[in-house]
Image: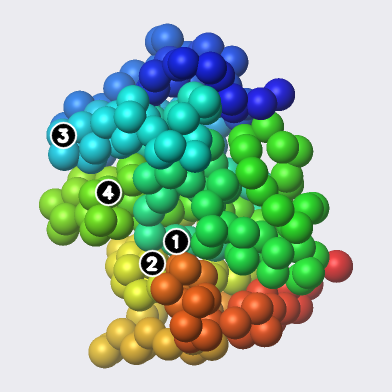
Amino acid sequence: MTDSVQGADGPVQPGSGWPGDQATATTPVARDAAEVRTLARAAGSLAELTARQSVCRACPRLVAWREEVAATRRRSFADQRYWGRPVPGWGADQPRVLIVGLAPAAHGGNRTGRIFTGDRSGDVLFESLWRCGLAAQPASTSAGDEQRLLGARMLAAVRCAPPENKPSVAERDTCEPWLAAEFALVYPSVAVIVCLGYFAWQAVWRELSRGGFGVPSPRPAFGHGVAVELAGLLVLGCYHPSQQNTFTGRVTPEMLDAVFERARRHANLP
């Protein structure tokens, strides 16, 4: 199944058949921070949580931006339908490795409906995950391309594409209950958390602190390859595979592979 639809303007309507869409016309919609907290806490399963995440409308600036991008589209994707909704976590329901990023890209996850799928950062990331045995294919271009994460799950700290890739503090905090609820549902199986960039690193330590882990004080400083172990849980820092970082050589395929190989070994994945 393809996500290309001639002449269609986003966002995609829940239950209309988009690959992997868990939401339906009856999925409850959060329209402010209080409703995010209520709906996140009340989600009884990972499927219901991802459905509720994917229809959230709690942050007016982010809603307006993601839908404007979905309607106008980039020229190179002018013949494609854009997802135009919050991008939920995806991958294994009981992951051994949890990969956390900042937010979907405007013409990546906001277009495809899957975090890191269809953008330049994802091109580099999925190649590394594939080499390290954490992804079934070396590339991921659309939500219907049969890519699978192997023993891993991927999500973003903020679920909507933000202007200039910079969510506000208020937007980060409004979205946080979605992240907290997903952590709570998958945590029992998780052995490793890989944080892609400083924003994700900070978000993960906030969740671990809220979850009652013995978080060091001060919190560990972010850096590529930084590793902190808490009662068997390994937290790894990894430079974000953004175009700026990969084009300048700040992060290389070998550097990514070193992080994900360590994650795979610690998680005892084949």
Name the quadrant of the N terminus: top right
Q: Is residue 251 above or below residue 68?
A: below
Secondary structure of the residue carrying tag 3 is: helix
Precedes in sequence: disc 4 or disc 2: 4
Taking the spot 25% from the left edge, 56% from the top edge, the residue there is: 164
Tell me, yes or no, whether the two marked residues, 4 and 2, touch with CB atoms within 8 Å.
no
Q: Residues within 10 Å of mark 2 (few under 14, many from 20)?
A: many
Taking the spot 52% from the left edge, 76% from the top edge, the residue there is: 246
Precedes in sequence: disc 4 or disc 1: 1
Closer to us: 114 or 235: 114
**Which of the two discs, 3 and 2, sits closer to the camera?**
3
Label annotation for residue 60:
3
**Which of the two discs, 4 and 1, sits closer to the camera?**
4
Precedes in sequence: disc 4 or disc 3: 3
Q: Residues within 10 Å of mark 1 (few under 14, many from 20)?
A: many
Label annotation for residue 200:
2
**Which of the two discs, 4 and 2, sits closer to the camera?**
4
Mark 4 to mark 2 CA distance (whole Å): 15 Å
Secondary structure of the residue carrying tag 4 is: loop
Amino acid type at circle 1 is Gly
Q: Position of residue 197 (x, y in %)?
A: 41, 73
Label annotation for residue 101:
1
Q: Position of residue 235 (x, y in %)?
A: 51, 77
Direction from residue 171 to residue 51 in the image, left or right: right
Taking the spot 50% from the left edge, 77% from the top edge, the residue there is: 247
